[in-house]
Amino acid sequence: MLTSLLYKLPYLVIGVFFVIAAVTIFLRARKMTRSEFFKVFKEAKYIQAWVLIVTFVLSFAFGVLNHLNSKNWVSAVVALNYSEASQAQNSNGTRYNMAEITCDEVIEKAIEKGAFENVTVKDIKSCLSVYPYVQGNVNSKEEYHISTEFIVEYCASRKTRHLDAESVIQLITSAYKEYYIEKYTDSYRLKTDEERPDFSKMEYMDIVLYLNKEATGILNYLYGLSEKGSSFVTSTNTTFNSIAGKVFQFRQTQIEENLKSLILQNGIVRDKSGYVDRLSYQNVNTGFDRQKHAASFNLCNQAIAMYSEEMTRVVLVPTWDEVGKYYMGRTKVGIDELSVKATGYSDLVAGNEKEIMDNNLVISKMNAAANVNVNQMADTLVASIDKSLIDFTKEAITAGREFSNYKMNQCIAVSVSGTSLFSELKDILIFAILAYAAIVLYAIAKKDFKKE
Amino acid sequence: MKKSRIFTIIRKVLPFIVVFCLLATLFIRAKLSSSNTFIASEVIHYNDEQAEKGFAPTGDKLDVNEIKSSAVMSKVVNRMGLTGIYSVDNLISRISITPLPDADKLAQKEAKLEEGEEYIYEPSTFIVSFAATSDEGPEFARTILDETLDVYFAEYSQKYVNIAPANNTVDKLYDENYDYIEMMELIDDGIDETLTTLYQRMEKNPYYRATSTGASFNDIVDEFNYLRSVKVSSLFARIYKYQLTKNKSVLVSDYTTRIDNNNIANTKETSIVEDIVVVIDAYVTKMRESGNTNITYEYILDNLHERNLTGDNGYITYGDQTVTYDELIYGWRDHNELKEHAIIDSAYCRYVIDTFQKCTGACGSGECQNSDKTCTELHNANYNNMKQEIDEEIKVLVDELTKLYDVTTQTNNEYNEFLGASYISVLSTASVVSSVNVNLYTIIAFFFLVVVCCGGLLVIGRLGDIIHNNFYTDPLTGFANHAYLEKYLDSMKGKILDLGTVFCMIEITNLPAINEKHTRKSGDEVLKMLARFMKNAFGKSGAEFVRESKGNFLVMANSTKYDTVRETMDHFKRYLDEREEFAEVQIEYKVGIAEAAEGEHTALKLLTEAARDKKPYVSEAK
Amino acid sequence: MKTRIIEHLKKVLPPEVVFTWIDNFVIEKCENNEIVIVYYGNEPLSKFKKEYQETVYSHICFVAGYENKIKLKQRKVKREKVPKDIKEKKQGRGSVAKWFVLSFIFIAIALSIALVIGNYIADRTFQETFYNVSSLKANNTMRVIQISDLHSCEYGENNKVLIDRVTKLKPDIIIYTGDCLDSKAASRTNVVKLCETLAKVAPSYYIYGNNEVERFYKFPLNQTELDAKFGFNDKNRDPSKLTAITDDLEKDLEAAGVKVLKNEKDTVLVGTTNVDVFGVLTSNPSSFWSYAGDEFNKFLYENTENLKIMAIHEPTVFTEFEVETWGDLAICGHTHGGTARLPLFGALYTHEEGFLPERQGYYVFGRYEVSGRPLIVNSGLVNNNLLRINNKPEVVIIDINRF
């Protein structure tokens, strides 16, 4: 409170001058005629040395205090540059929430980034305010507006006065940008070394599964990107589909064909009995599933057989097919659905049987081969495939980032503005004029409005 | 000075009026500010085509008031850390939802209804508002509204779009004392369930990738499948191979119980199936007998019936028009399927029991058959170590699965928010207006007060005028009277008259003679006439007229000159000389004029001068 | 009344009469219907009376009343002994201007002294300047702290304050862009200790500035001098001969865990991002390409997926050469921000570029864009210059992330 009083002191001083002058003039002018009153002002001396000096001193004091005070107030404009912003969405399609600009997490991040001392999240939060740069009106459709630019204002309080205001706002906006990037932008990344498995402890067929999974992961990522921007061309003149094609080909050739065949044909396995037992268990499990699917299949067929022919009457219905061609369809009855279900179960049965056969094949290959638990060629191939997959991942990530960068258009732009020199000079000038007027008025009141 | 007297008073009192009005305005402003509220409003629109019929995507009734449900608001309070500071009901009471019907669609609806047709239209655009008090400020209003809609969008999606979240079934694994095989079954079933849900998501949006996890549903499915194929099956295989169990007897009895339960269930199912068969036969027979089945393929339907039906409660719902016969057949199939699956389940249970009860060949005398320990337990020294290993590996697997479930939940939650934002779009982001335009009303209040105060003064001044008219006016001529002149001189005591002030004294010297000769009444009429002439002569100069005494008049003129007044008196003299009224009356009078010099004359002094300046004139009778 | 009479006379009489006579009239008495006017002057009053008495009297009567008796007297003066109010009237106009000028000069001097002292006191502490740089190569957010142009100054005992703050700011990389050791400093211990302490906080790199070069090489590192020293010409130049020279500072710093980069690069892993830092020894434009060019090109064009940071002491090369790229980020110092900084005009003076260098397009202070990427010029931490005005010493903190 003392500080704010201090900042208002120059105003108080000229206020006092003005009030004394006004009261003095008012009291003394009551007994004067209008012409006398104006004559006093006409004859008064407006340029007096002491008035100039006092005005200068007060203006200087005001200038210094104003400058110090303005250091405690700064604002920034946060502009959302990505395309989804105009639909009030984040870049990942979720709803944009302006309050996140000054949420606790962002402020904590800012405090950490700036290594601010003796200040809490609550202290800084109470000094911040956020509002849209332009806000619409819900009264009419023409006035609807989706804000994509927001003003963040920081006005230091007693507890935060020791911090540099411009640094605070810069760090808040920078922390928000980081928070936003972490939360709402493409975060597909390469696995760290800790997350990567130790191939030397894995079964070779499991390595095949793992590498296959990794390759599929890259493909999924690229297909997803392709859906959003199939025509986007990266700086290396590739498209997402072209990179996906390479990965697909690689997966088919290197993993499915080369590595898997090498392992199967040579029966390379670290723990043969353990692996065979595992496959056997899978077969047992799959066998039970197969039985259930087969039972369901049979029941559907029985139900179809049971279906009374009199109840299968259908009528024709004019309708459209999937491609919009007009044709004469017919009403569906229960056996239609049963047939579809039966087909589904049949597919499942076939799937289960294939799984069992695949496992049996592997088991037979393992059993037939000599006990090869470590194979240099396989290890080399695995390492090379793994490296290639890492390279593909990097390529996909780079392409994804370029696309993201292109779409995001720098994501969020921030411009910080404090009080400019011009506005400070303007304030000082206005103050100087007011001060001069008040002091001159005081001088005139004391000197020229004499008591008769 | 009658007219300007009021304004003189106002001018004198104006500073006090201004100060008073300023203070009053400040007080009013403070009051307005404290009672002001800030209303944040946002416009949302439900994009789904069912919304215009009043339905959510699932077919349930769309209830917009869910925005201000306690489920949503309690989450908002938690998220904003307002627990204990604000009550949920308090915040709910400040939210309002206003529908914005489409004018065209409304017109269409009315037109159709007039024609007797059915037309269902419900507004799908709404204004959602939240009101904050002046203490809370506009930002609070905006923040609460934003958070409320954030939570609502996610809730909407979870309830009506992305239903059936993937649940983490492995977190309860250590609550009950499950055996290893049972734990693995729970894990396997959990993965199975999760995969079913994830496949549904994958179908709808195969390439959706959450930014919080960097994972898509495809990736998560692959991870689950990988864990299942590699780790789950590996653990299963080891448990079976080494007959790892915490308690063989308990395990065997558990699975035996399952078999028994299946058998009991199957008995029930068999009975149901038999009953259904009976119903089916009877149904078909009846249909056949009724001839309802004689529909030929040449029959063509004219129209497809409406999908919607009106329920008992008046709500419109989808109607189930599946044929009853088909329902019977499906029922037969479903119950039989349960029975068959139960049989297969029993076979599986039997397989498990056999696995744990069988002898691996290490027992010579088959002692493991009668023991409550498995054969491996009896004969493998490493059994306990293996159990420990399995325990640890299950824990590791559970940890991995828990992490994966966390990723799934996070991905799913973000997917909910994404769907929510795609099903509900924002047409106008939160804008805040204050209920009272404080600045405008403050300015209006100030000017109103100034006007009222000045008006009040004017009224008081008018009162003054009334008083003036009654006490200070000469009834004969309408001029001010002597009392007024005295009051005036009193008020001007010591004050110097402005330059341009001229006093003109007119004395009717032969008034007694006129009264005597022509009667008093005529004398009065003559005075009236003279007064009229004076007024005419001075025109609109703004001069004030006083009847000092019987035949003495005083004219007080401002902003004029001696010469001007003299000329005016010349006009007066001419009026008198050329009069036709009372032409027979000779009027003798004196006129004295004095002009105030700058800074010199008081009113009395000027009056004295004017009196001294009097010169006689005669207006002859005709 | 007296004033009114005089004012009225001034209005009705010609200016020369006013100046010669009326200005010297004083009304000594104006009461009891008697007005006494005294002329303080040496002109013959009879002359005035002859021409203007009637006019003056009639005007006086007009103002004061006809009943007044008017007397006009004269009092001669010997040495311009005129009454105070007349003296003041004549002197009034000149004194204000004199006061004003004197006051202005006094205040200007006082302000200047206050400014210098104030800045000197303010420069005892340093400010932290934050910059944000985006690069697609950044897999994660990282922080680079740049310390430059310390010139052996201290912030706190043994730079405790500086060390505390840098530690709390949690950098991922610390880069010293030269002149941290002053060429005339008695000892290099405080700088080495500073680097040693901060090397425990984050990987640190040290680049030589002109002060280090002066102290340890003893000759300027321009092409002419270098070629003369090693006997090189354009055909047989071998830059490795220069970088092979070691000195005591380099040994101390390497021992302290700080890598000294002399026209070479080093790679450091920050999170999941590989960062190549290239330090320039020969920052003189004449010797940059000839002695650092090959290594610089390797830095730019090998492992292109790594984030590239170029650290150099002087910013002159950026003005002299136009290249396709200088890397993802370039940082430098040397200019001290121009020592004194004027509002609107920027830096007042630099040794190489002269007055108002920023107005001439040179890189002096703050953030610029060169070849499409950011260049940050650090104004340094040196605070022993009285003329360092409106230019607080700074530590630069650069946060790098993807967008």
Image: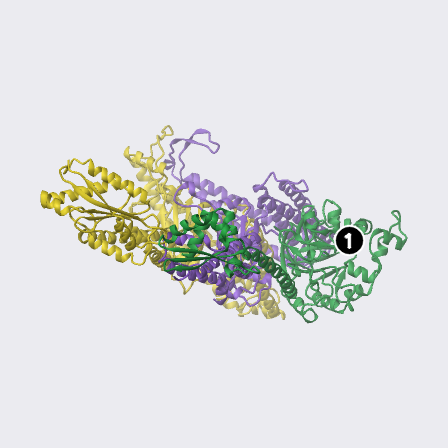
Chain colours: A purple, B yellow, C green
A197 or B263: nearer the eye? A197
Tell me which corner region of the image, top left, top right, bottom left or bottom right, holds residue C110: bottom right
Q: Chain of mark 1?
A: C
The residue at 27%/57% (across/down) is B491
| Kind of residue at disc 1 | Ser
* Residue closest to the eye, C196 or B150: C196
Q: Disc 1 on helix, strand or loop?
A: loop
Left or right of C179 on screen, residue A318 = left
Instruction: Report the residue marked by disc 1.
Output: C283
Residue B147 x/y as whole percent? 45, 55
- Asked whether residue A310 is in view, the answer is yes
Position of residue C3 measured from the top left corner of the image (x, y, whole percent): 43, 56
Q: Is residue B622 left or right of residue B91?
A: left
The mark total stands at 1
Q: Is the residue marked by circle 1 packed among few (<14), some (14-19), or many (20+) residues within 10 Å?
A: many
Q: Percent x, y for residue B382?
A: 63, 69
Q: Please say if B18 is above or below B557.
A: below
Question: Residue C35: percent from the left, percent from the top?
Answer: 41, 57
Residue nearest the observer in this picture, C116 or A401:
C116
Q: Nearer the viewer, residue A379 or A335?
A: A379
A160 w.r.t. B96: above or below: below
Quarter occupied by the C terminus of chain A: bottom left
